[in-house]
Image: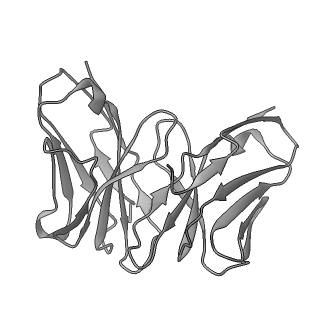
Amino acid sequence: DTGVSQDPRHKITKRGQNVTFRCDPISEHNRLYWYRQTLGQGPEFLTYFQNEAQLEKSRLLSDRFSAERPKGSFSTLEIQRTEQGDSAMYLCASSLSGTAEAFFGQGTRLTVV
Amino acid sequence: TQLLEQSPQFLSIQEGENLTVYCNSSSVFSSLQWYRQEPGEGPVLLVTVVTGGEVKKLKRLTFQFGDARKDSSLHITAAQPGDTGLYLCAGSLGGSYIPTFGRGTSLIVHP
């Protein structure tokens, strides 16, 4: 198993553009999480899926953000009409249900210019 | 207000020194995890503690979970430059199993 994989690693986009990130979790993990991390902060929870169901969303997840996990495998996080405040590291993690031991990908660094 | 408060926020020490970092909360956690994160990378899981009073050792790292399961500490013996990184604690409340992170302790070990 290669662990959690995220793509792309880096993304630079102009303000107002849409961006989409992909996460491939560890294959036997049924939970998948998205977090956002800015400089000097720990990861902040955005949303999580159990299999294909999105079970919880943070208030941080504005209407411009949407996440999907079709078929309970990979997940995508889309940000519409990006703003400079969206610049951050977006982290994906996966785990087995019934445990809080999450395994993280390397993250996608988003820069909005 | 952070659910998990980590201290100190920054720590800069010389190789060979010992150090302790802390993770505190007013909430009771069903489990608590420690992660290490290097710049530009995702956090890497180091350990999970579950039982109040539990002590786990990972080479030169010693992790302790408080008796009341509200706090934890990480002690590093004879720090090395390879220990440099951001140390994060994360806990989950009740049966949610959603990791909630502190802000981390940024450690620099100088050769």
Residue B5 point in image, percent of width and height: 60, 52
Rendered view: B90 above or below B40? below
Rendered view: A7 above or below B110? below
Residue at the spot 68% in from the left edge and 79% down from the top edge? B52
Q: Is residue A56 left or right of residue A4?
A: left
Residue B13 point in image, percent of width and height: 81, 35
Q: Is residue A7 left or right of residue A72?
A: right
* Between B54 and A6, the one nearer to me in the picture: B54
Tell me the quarter of the image containing the N terminus of chain A.
bottom left
* Between B108 and A58, the one nearer to me in the picture: A58
Q: Is residue A113 left or right of residue B33?
A: left
Q: Quadrant of residue B71?
A: bottom right
Residue at the spot 17% in from the left edge and 70% down from the top edge? A53
Colour scheme of the picture: one colour
Residue B58 point in image, percent of width and height: 72, 65
Q: Residue furthest top?
A: A113
Q: Quadrant of residue A104?
A: bottom left
